[in-house]
Amino acid sequence: MGKPAVSRDAFRGLFALYAAKAHHDHKAEAEHSLLRMFGSADDIPDTLLQQWSDRAEMLGSETVGRLLDPLVRQITNGNAQYDHASDFLHTLLRDLGQKMQ
């Protein structure tokens, strides 16, 4: 298997970016949750990263952003929690897969 088009560090960066925003907005619980996912992103299986890369490339950044934003908003508003970054990625991949159909 080749290296995913989107690196693990780039995917982790999404969590860092949103954690910084939660910090700025004084949403400590959301910040903690996002930082926990940032740390757990090191353990995301390569196969999931490859699926993320393939679907993100196929759908384009605008579509991915439209699907990603509500998922992160759920976290920052306290309406969703994920134990691990791969749980979040599974949800995102499911939504991306539905968009592809």
Image (cartoon, rainbow, N blue to C red):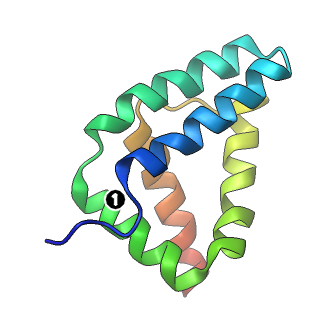
Depth check: give the residue in front, 13 or 62. Answer: 13
Q: Quadrant of residue 34?
A: top right
Residue visible at 57% across and 65% down in the picture = 95
- The amino acid at mark 1 is Leu
Label total for image = 1
Residue visible at 34% across and 59% down in the picture = 49
The image position of residue 58, as x and y in percent, is 51, 84
Identify the element where label 1 is drawn: helix
Residue visible at 40% across and 26% down in the picture = 39
The image position of residue 41, as x and y in percent, is 37, 37
Residue 86's place in the image compared with 61, above or below, is: above
The image position of residue 97, as x and y in percent, is 50, 75
Which quarter shows the C terminus? bottom right
Instruction: Note whether residue 79 is visible.
Output: no
- For label 1, the residue is 49
Residue 79's place in the image compared with 51, above or below, is: above
Which quarter shows the N terminus? bottom left
Instruction: Note whether residue 100 is visible.
Output: yes
The image position of residue 71, as x and y in percent, is 67, 48
